[in-house]
Amino acid sequence: MATSRFVHASLALLLATVACALTPERLPELDRRFYYNLPTPSTQQDFLKQPASERQDYLERQGLWQRWVGLPESEREAAASGDVQVGFHEFALLMAWGPPADTQVRDVNDRPITQHTYIRCTSGPKAGRYVRNNLDCDGTSNETKVSIRNDIVSEIEYAR
């Protein structure tokens, strides 16, 4: 009887461990995009501990799910595949490419504009991924500048 309880407890622990992702790379793609947009390392760790069935509830408590479903469907589809276009909402950009490497706010003609700088790996094991630091690429990289005005992508300046 004690052996049976031990086996059941071990199996339950194993299932709980498998249901939770231990690293962001083990998350499904959309969940991984949400993970990188969580506000702090502690909320990111909490998200990794959530069973798959509870991740949406967690994102709702963080306010990210509402921002996601508030985007037009065309933006959600494009962001889920990593595409960003002028006219998209800033949150679609963040879901597509993750947090920027740098952000600056400037006044242009007395109007605030946010400019995000993204670093994209162009070679190496992370080619095609956006990272926070070009040293994270283990290869070459380029920068893309994205201007945001009133929560809308107003300009995308790709590296030449």
Image (spheres, rainbow, N blue to C red):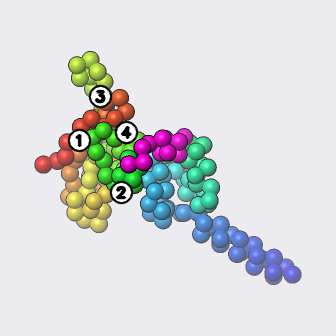
Mark identifier at residue 113: 3
User: Which residue bears the numbered disc 1?
Assistant: 156
User: Furthest-left residue in view?
Assistant: 160
The magenta stretch is: 63-74
CA gap between label 1 and label 3 equals 13 Å
Q: CA distance from mark 4 to mark 2?
A: 15 Å
Q: Quadrant of residue 152?
A: top left
For marks 4 and 2 on the same chain, the one whose residue lies earlier in the sequence: 2
* Circle 1: element type: strand
Question: Mark 4 or mark 3, which is nearer the start of the sequence?
Answer: 4
> Is 53 in front, or is 159?
53
Would you name the residue on which mark 2 appears? 81
The Cα–Cα distance between marks 3 and 4, rounded to whole angstroms, is 14 Å
Q: For the residue labelled by badge 4, is the local secondary structure a helix, a strand or a loop? A: loop
Seen from the viewer's position, the closer of residues 75 and 36 is 75
- Quadrant including the N terminus: bottom right
User: How far apart, in angstroms, are the residues tagged by discs 1 and 2?
Assistant: 17 Å
**Residue 46: percent from left, percent from top:** 58, 52
Q: Residues within 10 Å of mark 4 (few under 14, many from 20)?
A: many
Q: CA distance from mark 1 to mark 4?
A: 13 Å
- For residue 42, side relative to residue 10 (left or right): left
Examine the rendering and report whether any part of residue 99 can be seen: no
Task: Write down the residue under mark 4.
Answer: 89
